[in-house]
RNA sequence: CGGGGCGUAGCGCAGCCUGGCAGCGCACUUGCUUUGGGAGCAAGAGGUCGCGGGUUCGAAUCCCGCCGCCCCGACCA
């Protein structure tokens, strides 16, 4: 490929609205262009990388027995209404209407298409198990698309669905996919961790997330410094602190004018925030629920939501406080009526003589103690985990890491096959719903994750096997005929060796070409210029290491080939 | 959806407060010089100043409404 004959619009300045490295560099290096929020055009370089990632995914899926098909993006609404996702996904679905007024949508994921497809044509247990996949664009009208390819409203996903007779089969299909995913992410070369994820409010099947490590990642996970514990932040439970023995102080009311937050109370009374007892109020389908945690901790709403699923958990708003007659910011657990469910995190057992609200504006109490002064109906691990918490396995220190979820696999059981009436006839003649699994990989998101993990101050540093091109041949003096001839010879020879090579034959100064080559991140650069030619040599540079070398004209092709073979 | 910010040439920005010729750098075109780490000089081309309305002799600038984009929070490959 010649740069004069393709479309690689590099930018000299950083785009103003790209904050993170992957977004900024993919725009600057001419890989992508934004069309509208969360929707990007893939230019030639991006397309080449996408295809290489896809190829790895495809190979490993097929090697694992999954069969590729292509199902539509434009979908009828009915199956989605049957599973309840038409409503549950809500505004996240791009909804359409056809000319007859029929409701349609763009596919955000495709259980509703795959399950009926299989049910229609593979009605016998003899047809099972089967695993189908596709690589196709997905559409989700995200609340907040951001960071370029990291969270788009249109993104390329590999999605696979397994269908089994029974639970044992499903687990086996799941295991096969789990191992395929390990091979895929190993081959792609991402630094990643696998965590058993929050079962989520959608039903609670076993599922694992494949998380690419990245400081800008939006997904948090927890791991023990001793390496024996790894979990999704919302699923992680710290080791409970031991109960303390303390001399019980009497409960005393104190004036705390204007101190409606933990921070202000602690400051006014000159105490640590951890000494205060935080009372967070929720409404759960009409029932009032109080959650007690130490003042320096946060309540995990997700954990609470999971506890009450399928009921809907909603934090109290001002109207709720008014209706219940609670003084917002001054709520204390000693004033709860019997109809309030009082939940507490085990860490509350570890404290005594709490400072908490007095149930009157501008007043708090000190010396509040469990049993004597307030009750707890249920003990549940509900604190948001944080750095420094103790590992539940060995008590080691936990640390919170950031990541980008690039793969997610689920055991769905009959969650979708039931409502969709997707069933087969078993050996005994009985009608049974398929036991399903689903397996997603965000292809375009992997591009972003790769750039996050592989860049420096000059630009992207693609791993060799995923780079848009292996080698760039730079004409340092584009209008010099001998230089051009020699560069063309090397370019052609590399191509003949099956190396993916691009020649920068633009009428640009050498500096521009060097900067662009570093920005785009070709693993190996070969520079042909007057200077070197006079000495009978070309210059080579390995992008990742920055290592420079020279080679004679005769050795140039072999030297570039060798450097490429040794590149990361 | 709540909070914050921004929309002026392809990209990055100034001008707006205090209304009066629409500017700067890069990129682009032509010429000359230059030529191995983002060249110099000269001459050009490129704008519904996000959209609509209002105030005014006059609006990029003031007022009202809308739209778009980015960032922070609750959801997700």
Image (cartoon, coloured by chain):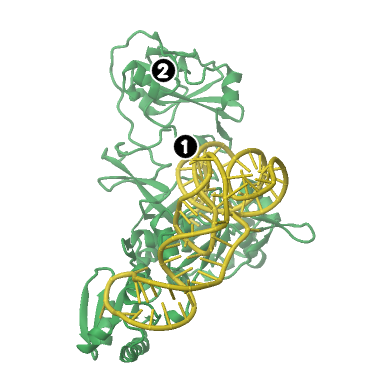
Chain colours: A green, B yellow
Image spot of residue A495 (x, y percent): 37, 86
Q: Seen in the image, is A523 located left or right of residue A77?
A: left
Q: Is residue A274 above or below residue A150?
A: above
Q: Quadrant of residue A248?
A: top left
Q: Which of marks 1 and 2 is nearer the N terminus?
A: 1
Kindly identify which residue carries mark 2. Answer: A356
Q: Seen in the image, is A35 located left or right of residue A148?
A: right
Query: Could you tell me which secondary element the residue under label 2 belongs to?
Result: strand
A38 or A226: nearer the viewer:
A38
Query: Could you tell me which secondary element the residue under label 1 belongs to?
Result: helix
Q: Can residue A176 be seen in this view?
A: no
What is the distance, in whole Å, between disc 1 and disc 2 at their CAs?
23 Å
User: What label does residue A383 carry, if any?
Assistant: none
Q: Seen in the image, is A72 located left or right of residue A374?
A: right
Q: Is residue A391 above or below residue A21?
A: above
The chain letter for the residue carrying disc 1 is A
Residue occupying the point 57% across, 16% down: A325
The quarter of the image holding the C terminus of chain A is: bottom left
Q: Can residue A358 be seen in this view?
A: yes
Image spot of residue A395 (x, y percent): 27, 37
A290 or A455: nearer the viewer:
A455
Kindly identify which residue carries mark 1. Answer: A303
Q: Which of marks 1 and 2 is in front?
A: 2
């Amino acid at each position: 490929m010649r740069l004069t004959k393709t479309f690689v619009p590099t930018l000299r300045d950083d785009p103003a609205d790209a904050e993170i490295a992957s977004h900024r560099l993919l725009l600057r290096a001419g890989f992508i262009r934004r069309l509208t929020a969360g929707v990007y055009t893939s230019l030639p370089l991006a397309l080449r990388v996408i295809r290489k990632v896809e190829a790895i995914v495809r190979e490993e899926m097929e090697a694992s027995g999954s069969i590729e098909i292509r199902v539509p993006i434009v979908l009828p609404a009915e199956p989605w209404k049957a599973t309840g996702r038409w409503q549950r996904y809500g505004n996240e679905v791009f909804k359409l209407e056809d000319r007859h007024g029929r409701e349609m949508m763009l596919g955000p994921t495709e259980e509703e298409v795959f399950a009926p497809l299989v049910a229609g044509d593979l009605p016998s247990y003899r047809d099972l198990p089967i695993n189908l996949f596709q690589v196709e664009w997905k559409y989700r009208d995200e609340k907040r698309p951001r960071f370029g390819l990291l969270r788009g409203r249109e993104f390329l996903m590999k999605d696979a669905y397994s269908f089994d007779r029974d639970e044992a089969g499903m687990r086996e299909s799941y295991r096969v996919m789990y191992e395929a995913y390990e091979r895929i992410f190993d081959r792609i070369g991402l630094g990643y961790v696998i965590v058993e994820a929050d079962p989520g409010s959608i039903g609670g099947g076993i599922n694992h997330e494949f998380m690419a490590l990245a400081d800008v990642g939006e997904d948090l996970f927890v791991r023990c410094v001793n390496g024996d514990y790894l979990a999704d932040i919302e699923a992680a439970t710290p080791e409970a602190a031991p109960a303390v023995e303390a001399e019980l102080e009497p409960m005393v009311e104190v004036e705390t004018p204007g101190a409606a937050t933990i921070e202000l109370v602690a400051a006014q009374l000159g105490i640590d925030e951890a000494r205060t007892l935080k009372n967070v109020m929720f409404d759960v389908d009409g029932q009032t629920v109080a959650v007690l945690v130490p003042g320096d901790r946060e309540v995990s709403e997700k954990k609470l939501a999971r506890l009450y699923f399928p009921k809907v958990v909603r934090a109290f708003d001002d109207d709720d406080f008014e209706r219940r007659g609670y003084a917002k910011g001054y709520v204390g657990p000693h004033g709860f009526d019997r109809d309030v469910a009082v939940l507490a995190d085990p860490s509350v057992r570890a404290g005594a003589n709490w400072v908490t609200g007095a149930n009157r504006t501008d007043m708090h109490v000190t010396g509040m103690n469990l049993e004597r002064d307030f009750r707890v109906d249920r003990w549940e691990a509900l604190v948001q985990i944080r750095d420094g918490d103790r590992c539940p396995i060995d008590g080691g220190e936990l640390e919170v890491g950031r990541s980008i979820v690039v793969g997610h696999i689920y055991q769905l059981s009959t969650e979708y096959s039931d409502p969709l009436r997707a069933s087969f006839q078993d050996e005994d003649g009985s009608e049974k719903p398929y036991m399903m699994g689903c397996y997603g990989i965000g292809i375009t998101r992997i591009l972003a994750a790769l750039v996050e993990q592989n860049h420096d101050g000059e630009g992207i540093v693609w791993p060799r096997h995923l780079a848009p091109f292996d080698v760039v041949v730079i004409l340092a003096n584009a209008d010099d005929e001998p230089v051009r001839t020699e560069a063309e010879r090397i370019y052609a020879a590399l191509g003949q060796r099956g190396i993916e090579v691009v020649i920068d034959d633009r009428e640009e100064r050498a500096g521009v070409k060097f900067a662009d080559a570093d920005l785009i991140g070709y693993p190996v650069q070969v520079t042909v210029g007057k200077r070197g030619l006079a000495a009978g040599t070309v210059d080579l540079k390995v992008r990742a290491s920055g290592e420079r070398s020279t080679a004679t004209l005769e050795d140039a092709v072999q030297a570039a080939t060798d450097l490429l073979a040794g590149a990361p």
